[in-house]
């Protein structure tokens, strides 16, 4: 398996300690720079109010299988948590798409650190992505 970044996330957070636990708890605005070769893949994205960013948490530890989640004293398996530290550190967050400037997406609610490699973007659809 081989993943190739399609862009880079620009964020005000320079370290994992600065970033919020989840993008939903953040009003931070960031930019997502899409590499030129993938720019045409953005066609139609302007119709979305929210998008899902899938990214590689390049600063995370990859040898962690147990963690204590925030607000808990109980140790859990990493797959039962949202810890960035995991065998394959894939991040996922829903952001508000504020603007598209050519190959730059301006987003609100970012939780990734600056210079994080972007793997993919998916449109957020409330009727598909929210289970009641």
Image (spheres, rainbow, N blue to C red):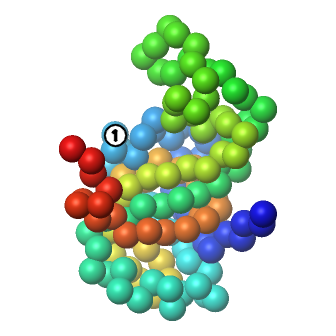
The answer to whether any part of residue 8 appears in the image is: no
**Residue at x 58% of width, y 57% of height:** 55
Pick the quarter of the image with the C terminus. Answer: top left
Q: Nearer the viewer, residue 28 or 61?
A: 61
Q: Position of residue 25 (x, y in %)?
A: 34, 40
User: Going by the image, does 21 lie left or right of 114?
Assistant: left
Residue that numbered label 1 is attached to: 25
Q: Position of residue 103 (x, y in %)?
A: 50, 83
The answer to whether any part of residue 118 appears in the image is: yes
Q: Residues within 10 Å of mark 1 (few under 14, many from 20)?
A: few
Q: Nearer the viewer, residue 13 or 71?
A: 71
User: Going by the image, does 18 lie left or right of 1?
Assistant: left
**Residue at x 27% of width, y 80% of height:** 47
User: Against 104, is 119 above or below?
Assistant: above
User: Going by the image, does 117 lie left or right of 39?
Assistant: right
Q: Position of residue 23 (x, y in %)?
A: 40, 46
User: Going by the image, does 37 lie left or right of 43?
Assistant: right
Residue 102, quarter of picture: bottom left
**Residue at x 29% of width, y 65% of height:** 125
Q: Nearer the viewer, residue 65 or 110?
A: 65
């Amino acid at each position: 398996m081989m993943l190739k970044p399609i862009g880079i996330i620009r964020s005000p957070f320079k370290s994992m300690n600065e970033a919020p636990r989840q993008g939903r708890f953040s009003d931070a605005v960031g930019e997502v720079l899409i590499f030129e070769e993938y720019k045409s893949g953005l066609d139609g994205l302007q119709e979305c109010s929210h998008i899902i960013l899938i990214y590689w948490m390049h600063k995370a530890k990859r040898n962690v299988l147990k963690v204590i989640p925030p607000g808990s004293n109980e140790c859990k398996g990493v797959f039962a948590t949202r810890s960035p530290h995991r065998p394959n550190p894939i991040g996922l967050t829903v952001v508000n798409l504020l603007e598209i400037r050519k190959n730059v997406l301006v987003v609100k609610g970012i939780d990734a650190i600056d210079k994080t490699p972007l793997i993919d973007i998916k449109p957020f659809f409330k009727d598909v992505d929210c289970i009641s």
